[in-house]
């Protein structure tokens, strides 16, 4: 099982260590991960209440490529189900999973804290308050057929994070511990306000709770286009900073003495990670666990180098959430389980297994 | 190369450095000595902008450090901090390669030249054979040498060392300081080292600067600075200063309270009771 042996672990000689550092370890791993991700996506697209064979699913998807026509003989209803119902949902779950894992890994790197997840400094609580406020308001919460809930969640998340950042500022710097404390305080204010709204509007309790626990039952291509403008640039920025994030793991003073403009890097990366997480949460609700555990799983499997940890977290996070969503909609079919319940219930045992398997310091 | 004038640094109301002036030429190794809390580390932190001075200025090759970008600064000055934190999970090679950070753009990754620089630095500090090992598996002395290697890999004209020999055994103390001195003399670097051990400082440094309560109280050749009178008043304890039989450099030892008063020993420069 070479796949599960960290490349760094076998490095006894300097030459092997050099080879690993030259990036030879990342590309095969990434290629394998992407292949697995595609496989999982195809599997998820092929399973559902309508009985569509896997090969038909593959043909329908492939026929969307220019110049390929493999699906002409298949019923139009199958094509609609695969292309308009299942695929947006699968892609959305994959994208949200990748985003949450990437953003969790970034938070863990910047805060140098293994307990950090994308919701640490206000994204979840802010989004929850924003969404709840719109859901319980007596006004109609759709404008021209478009729901205001994602918009309110997005705004709430960013407001909470910005507030925490502003409050944690000491002179020219934002000490990370102060930022965590400010984030926790802001989160608790937002959460209590949200709880009050929920309790005082108990007739909408089910709607609110379902939103909070997260899910992809409302997925459509349109929501995906709303997500990408935030997630793509954020991911590009964060991935570029893998090497710098490694240096930041020393501590902020050493990073600075090695030429890293620490405050600017912190602002840029926390901003990118928060923006991406806020966008993800706004379309999918507050899906827990992915952003915390997936980066740790990657660390346990392949070591702490952020240049591989960030992309591999995206791949693994995407595949994990696609599988979790598949379970969420099939286990109790035709009704759905909120996907957040699945991620925690099935993800945690796997993580504990990894933790027991690898008995050494990982963070 | 390094020019410090009237430097005053304070942490809140606590003044750590008062109007310190110092200059350093290429090829020179200068030791900063003084008791705990005398401002040695603060001086090093101020040169790398980790603390902002209240007054005075610090110039590198005529340019004020406050005006350099963090990256430009790190291409001119490398630091060996006092017992720095290193994550256990990283390998020696990964940590040493971090020394190349100021030479790499955002889109670049380490190339042949960087690996060559790191290999040379690891070989110079006798840690190349550890390259693939994890930090968590190293002894204190090995870790310290890896930090020195990281600073050397930075390839800067100025090297600042904060207690570089604190965790090392005698053999590696000598090896590290020999290396630093040779880098100064042979490769024309300038070195500024805060050193607790006065005898080591006297042995290896071309000049010493003695700090006490944030002020410079002595500066010059080791023989001048390490006088029993000055040491006694600064450290508040009796010391003996001998001249080394081979090098002629001063050797300093504290005298225990119950030893004979004014005991004269062969080769002794003098003893003093405070």
Image (spheres, coloured by chain):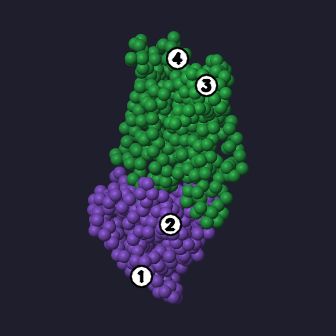
Q: Nearer the viewer, mark 2 or mark 4?
A: 2
Q: Nearer the viewer, mark 1 or mark 2?
A: 2
Answer few, some or many: residues within 10 Å of disc 2's Cα (few below 14, many 20 plus, some between 14 and 19): few
Give the SS element for disc 2: helix
Answer few, some or many: residues within 10 Å of disc 3's Cα (few below 14, many 20 plus, some between 14 and 19): few
Q: Position of residue A188 (x, y in %)?
A: 48, 29
**Considering depth in this image, is A144 or B88 the residue closer to the camera?**
A144
Question: Residue A207 bears which disc, if any?
Answer: 4
* Residue for badge 1: B223
Instruction: Tell me the colour chain B is drawn in.
Output: purple
Residues tagged by mark 4 and mark 3 found on one chain of the structure: yes
* Residue for badge 2: B112
Q: Position of residue A231 (x, y in %)?
A: 46, 37
Q: Earlier in the sequence, mark 1 or mark 2?
A: 2
Q: Label 1, label 4: how many angstroms apart (C-alpha)?
A: 82 Å
**Mark 1, chain letter?**
B
Q: Label 2, label 4: how many angstroms apart (C-alpha)?
A: 58 Å
């Amino acid at each position: 099982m070479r796949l599960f042996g960290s490349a760094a672990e076998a490095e006894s000689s300097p030459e092997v260590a050099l080879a690993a550092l030259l990036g030879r370890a990342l590309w095969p791993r990434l290629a394998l991960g992407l292949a697995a991700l595609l496989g999982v996506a195809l599997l998820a697209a092929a399973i559902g209440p309508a009985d569509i064979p896997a090969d038909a699913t593959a043909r329908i998807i492939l026929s969307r490529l220019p110049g390929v026509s493999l699906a002409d003989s298949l019923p139009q209803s199958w094509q609609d189900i695969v292309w308009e119902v299942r695929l947006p949902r699968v892609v959305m779950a994959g994208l949200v999973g990748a985003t949450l894992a990437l953003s969790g890994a970034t938070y863990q790197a910047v805060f140098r804290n293994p307990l950090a997840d994308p919701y640490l400094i206000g994204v979840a609580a802010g989004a929850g308050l924003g969404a709840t406020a719109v859901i319980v308001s007596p006004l109609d919460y759709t404008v021209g057929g478009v729901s205001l809930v994602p918009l309110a969640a997005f705004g709430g998340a960013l407001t909470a994070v910005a507030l925490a950042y502003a409050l944690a500022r000491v002179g020219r710097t934002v000490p990370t511990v102060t930022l965590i404390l400010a984030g926790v305080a802001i989160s608790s204010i937002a959460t209590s306000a949200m709880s009050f709204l929920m309790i005082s509007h108990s007739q909408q309790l089910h709607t609110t709770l379902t939103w909070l626990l997260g899910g992809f039952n409302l997925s459509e291509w349109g929501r995906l286009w709303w997500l990408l403008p935030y997630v793509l640039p954020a991911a590009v920025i964060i991935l570029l900073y893998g090497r710098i994030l490694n240096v930041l793991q020393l501590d902020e003073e050493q990073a600075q003495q090695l030429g890293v403009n620490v405050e600017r890097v912190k602002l840029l990366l926390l901003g990118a990670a928060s923006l991406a997480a806020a966008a993800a949460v706004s379309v999918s609700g507050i899906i827990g666990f992915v952003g915390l555990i997936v980066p740790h799983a990657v660390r346990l499997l392949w070591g702490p180098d952020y240049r591989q940890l960030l992309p591999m977290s995206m791949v693994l996070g995407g595949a994990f959430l696609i599988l979790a969503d598949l379970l969420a909609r099939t286990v109790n079919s035709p009704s759905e389980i909120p996907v957040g319940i699945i991620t925690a219930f099935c993800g945690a045992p796997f993580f504990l297994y990894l933790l027991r398997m690898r008995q050494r310091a990982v963070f | 190369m390094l020019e410090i004038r009237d430097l005053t640094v304070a942490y809140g109301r606590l003044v750590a450095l008062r109007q310190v002036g110092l200059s350093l030429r290429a090829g020179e190794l200068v030791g900063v000595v003084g008791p705990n809390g005398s401002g040695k580390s603060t001086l090093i932190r101020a040169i790398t902008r980790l603390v902002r001075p209240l007054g005075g200025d610090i110039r590198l090759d005529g340019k004020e450090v406050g005006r350099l970008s963090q990256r430009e600064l790190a291409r001119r000055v490398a630091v060996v901090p006092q017992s720095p934190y290193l994550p256990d999970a990283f390998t020696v090679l990964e940590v040493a390669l971090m020394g190349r950070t100021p030479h790499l753009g955002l889109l670049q990754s380490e190339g042949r030249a960087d690996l060559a620089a790191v290999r040379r630095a690891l070989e110079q500090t006798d840690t190349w054979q550890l390259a693939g090992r994890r930090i968590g598996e190293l002894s204190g002395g090995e870790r310290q040498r890896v930090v020195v290697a990281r600073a050397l890999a930075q390839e800067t004209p100025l090297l600042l060392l904060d207690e570089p020999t604190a965790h090392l055994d005698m053999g590696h103390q000598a090896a590290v300081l020999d290396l630093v001195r040779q880098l100064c003399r042979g490769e024309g670097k300038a070195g500024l080292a805060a050193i607790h051990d006065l005898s080591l400082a006297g042995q290896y440094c071309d000049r010493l600067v003695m700090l006490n309560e944030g002020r410079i109280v002595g500066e010059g050749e080791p023989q001048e600075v390490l006088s029993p009178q000055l040491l006694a008043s600064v450290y508040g304890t009796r010391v003996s200063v001998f001249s080394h039989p081979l090098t002629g450099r001063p050797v300093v030892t504290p005298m225990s309270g119950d030893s004979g008063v004014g005991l004269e020993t062969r080769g002794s420069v003098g003893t003093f009771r405070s």
